Every structure is written in C-alpha cells, then in structure tokens.
Image (tube, helix red, strand yellow):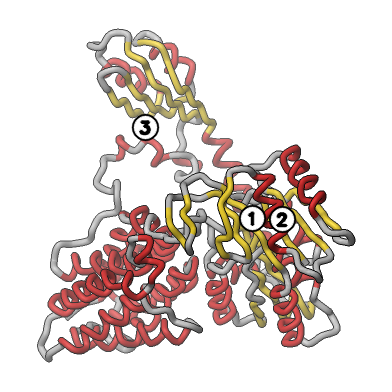
Amino acid sequence: MITAQTLRDAMLSGSNNLGNQRQRVDSLNVFPVPDGDTGTNMSMTMGAAAQELEAMDPSSATVYDVAHTAASALLRGARGNSGVITSLLFRGFSKGLKGKETADAGDFVEALSKGVSAAYKAVMKPTEGTMLTVARLSAEAAKEKYVPGMEVRELWDVVVKEAADALAKTPEMLPVLKKAGVVDAGGQGLLCIYEGMKAVFDGQGIIPAAGESRPAEARPDADAAGELELEDLTYPYCTEFIVLKEDKKADSLKLRAYLESIGDSAVVVDDEDIIKCHVHTDCPGKAIQKALEFGMLNKIKIDNMWIQHDVKKKAAEAKARNQEAVEPTEANGFVAVAAGEGVKQLFLDLGVNQVVSGGQTMNPSTDDILRAAEATPSHTVFVLPNNKNIIMAAEQAAKLCKSREIRVVPTRTIPQGLSAMLAFDEGREPSENLLEMTKAADRVGTGQITFAARDSEYDGHKIKEGELLALENGKVSFTERDLKKAAVKLTRALLNRETSFVTVIYGQDITQEQAQEVESAIREKLPDGVDMALVDGGQPVYYLMISVE
C-alpha cells in the first residue's frame, strides 16, 4: 500500500527529476522561435506543487490529502499549455484517490484513468503524438496489465515502460516531430515526472534536485540578499572577486582565514591559476587589499545586501498592493498579458485595469492571471492572453475564480489584444462583447520578426540559428538577414485590399534609429490611403510586431 508519505515523496522526486532535465526537455521544442519552453513551464508548474508538499506534514495526512494538495497547487501554478495539461492530469488523478487513506495498485489504475479523462476533456482539439498520448497509452497499459494483488511498484514499472514506448512513437504520429528528429517535449517531460516517482516506489528514495547534494560553501549565491531575511544579514557587503595568482604555490588557506576574520559566508575556491573568493563583510576594502598580496584581481563585485533586501521588499509590497483582491464595484474590467513598458502602456491607455507581465519565454501562471482578475474592481473581467500558450492558463483562472466572472478573449498576439480592446462597447452585454472582441482580433493580420533559436527544418523552411525569422499570423513565412528587407517583405505579405492602417511596434533590442529606418522603408512600399504608426513597445524576443488592419 502507498501511504501519504510515499506519495508525497514520489511527487517531490518527480518534480526534482523534471527540474534536473528541464533544459533537455526545452531542447526538444520543434518551433525555432524562442519559446515559453515546455521543460521550463512544466518544471515551474511542478515546482509549485513541490513547494506546497514540502510544507505539509504527511504523518497526519491521507493519500488523497497529498494528491489534492498537489493538484490544487499545480492548477494555480500552471504555466503554458504543457503546464496546464500536467495540472489537469494530476487533478483527475486526485479525484481518483478521493476518500483514500492509503492506495494500492488498483486505486492507481483508477486515478490514472481519471487523470487522462480530465485532460482530454479540457483540450478542445486533442492532438495525438503529444503528452496526452503518452499519458493515455501508459494509463491504458496499466489498466490492461493490472491484476489483483499487484504492487504499486510493479504497476508503475508498466506505466513508465509504456510511457517511454509511447514517447518513442510520437514522431510517427506527428510529422513535424519526425522531420525535426525529436520526440514530443511535453511527453518527455511527463516521462521525467513518472521516472522520478518510480525511484520512490522502487525504494530508492527521492531523486535530489540538481545541486542539492553540494555543500553550502560551494554555492556562494545561495545566501544572496534575495534569499535571506534582513535579520540574518550580519554584514552588509557581499564581496566577490577572482585573484590571478602570481605564485602558483600561494597558500589560499591564509586568504580564507583572513576573510573569515573580517566577515562570514567566506568561500575560497583554489585553482591552478586563480583563487575565486566570496565573503560577506563590512570592510570590502580590507578583503580586496589582502587579496592583492596574492596577485592581480579580476571581476570584482560588491553589492550592498541591506539595500538589495530593502529594494526587493518594497517592490514585493508594491506588487502585493497592486494585486490585492478588491470588491467588484463596476460592470466591466480588463486584464492583459504583455511584456515591454511601451506595450503595457498601450493597454493601460486603452482602459486595461491590470497588466500581467508575460508573453513569449515567460508564461504567467494561472494564479498570476487569477490574482490580477481579482484585483480588478469589476463584476465581469475580460482577460486578453495575447499568446497562444497562455490561453489555457487564462481559461483555468476563469474556472477557479469565484468572486467575479472572467471572460477569456482568445487573443494570440499583442496586435490582436489591442484590436479586441478597441472593439469593446460598454453598451453591450458581456457575451456580445466577447463575440465582437474575438471577431475584431481575428480580423487583424499580425507579423512578427524574431530570431531563430536553433537550427531546424520547419514547415518546409530550412532555418539556421540566429537568422531573422518572419512569422505571418503565427506561421513561419521566411528567413532573412536584413531587418529592413524582412520588415518590408512581411508587411507586404500581410496587406490586402481592405487594409487601411499599419502599426509597427519595435522591441527592446531595436534602437530608435533602426526603427525609423524600418518605418521609412515600409512607408515607401505602402499603397496610397494606408496610414502607418511607429510605436516603441520595448518588448523582448520580438524585434518587430506588425499589425495590419
């Protein structure tokens, strides 16, 4: 029988194993655009559950308590589509263990089946060859091979083996995976979780998170000001530097002893040519002066941790105040997801109440969106995800919200979100507004220019890492080396007979001069009667976002 303690440890082990292999899972993303990254999203989602599980006392809990705690944290911490699907799998799994103090293999068969059912129901158009397939086939194999009296350890061997076999078949189910020569990233992430759980069921204990077994002194950044409370900081200055040794036989122990005499958290790592030092002290000058006796210094870094702590604390308090739940007093309100100060200001100028930081490479969690909606003083809150990988998290936030009604406008890009806001009419009913805002978003042609994050062959295009990548309504259109040429070509591809306005939003990696050159190049090619605006969006990842209406 599996106890609460064992299930808790298995979940923690699964989270750690996924976290350890996060980059490997990220590398399987087929789409060459810098992405929210499947491994990162799933790892952060599982991390939310691990945090809650570590805080609970399993000695007085049931397996359902553990499963329910994990499922609730997963749902609120879900990031990206892969994170949401992970949360739904474990939410169904939790329902399968409802009322159970302990669980046997038969209970796990039922729980896995309910997990798969919950995930498939939540996805409007399930695609086979993804993590859904891996979850389904492994659950079906568990049901097929289960026999009364079977141990959970034996059953989980079946689950892991079938999950691995199903994962290996995903390229045959999805041609895009086969062409890229990879398996499904979400399926790989799920297998990592299952394999981490298996270690506990096999009696091997929790797989440690990467770096957990390293001694504290080998992790000088582990006690940075952001991680410690102010009362734990005896000395204000975090001082780091590298000594370029003049004498290869210099005794670094003497330097360490001195640093320990003037501060704490001293770390001295001696190499053949250098000595790397870290110390908390109120006399950084003395530390540096002593180090000069051993050789020249490089990469000197001194931070006032008291100030860092104060700045971080004030920022956290300001964020908390801004996202405090409020009573609804107005009819309609708005939450938008956006990155870049210029883009955020555009939404605020259009009447958005709360802007959640996020987008490509930084998908906000379900809870981030939920808290923003609850901080909006309105009975109906329209949420604009502005990214296809954030829509599911927004939809889960809508299901969790009890204090007001959340309507998710399925916007996939920033230009779509802006057009949706312009289509809102206070005189309409919420359902009518949702329809009209969605229609307005669908009428917008969106072009995006970014860079290729990896070599790939995608959708008929051979793509080299670092090339400019032009996307037309979310699909790869072409690659280019010259930004102006790419902008003109993409804009012309988006134009149609009804086009009356073009907006170019330039990102944080583009200078104003470059942006103006792009603007001039595009204007020269625009048909008569088409107006154009240039906006400093400050967004990351995308050099240019082009809206055609």
Residue 191, above or below 223: below
Of the two numbered discs 3 and 2 on the same chain, state the one appearing first in sequence. Answer: 3
The reply to whether the C-beta atoms of the residues labelled 2 and 1 are less than 8 Å apart is yes
Q: What residue sits 72% from the left and 81% below the top?
A: 379
Q: Say which of 149 and 343 sits in front.
A: 343
Which residue is labeled 1 in the image?
Answer: 339
Q: Residue furthest right?
A: 529
Per the image, label 3 sits on a secondary structure element best described as strand
Which residue is labeled 3 in the image?
Answer: 265
Q: Is residue 121 left or right of residue 396?
A: left
Q: Quadrant of residue 549?
A: bottom right
Residue 422, above or below 340: below
Q: What residue sits 25% from the left and 64% below the top?
A: 196
Give the class, few, some or many, for how many residues have Cα within 10 Å of label 1's Cα (few <14, many ≥20).
Answer: many
Image spot of residue 273 (x, y percent):
29, 17
Per the image, label 1 sits on a secondary structure element best described as loop
Q: Residue furthest left?
A: 149
Q: Is residue 81 left or right of residue 3?
A: right
Give the class, few, some or many, for how many residues have Cα within 10 Å of label 3's Cα (few <14, many ≥20).
Answer: some
Mark 2 and mark 1: Cα distance apart in space: 7 Å
Q: Amino acid at mark 3?
A: Ser
Mark 3 and mark 1: Cα distance apart in space: 37 Å
Q: What residue sits 33% from the left and 29% below the top?
A: 267
Q: Amino acid at mark 2?
A: Val
Which residue is labeled 2 in the image?
Answer: 343
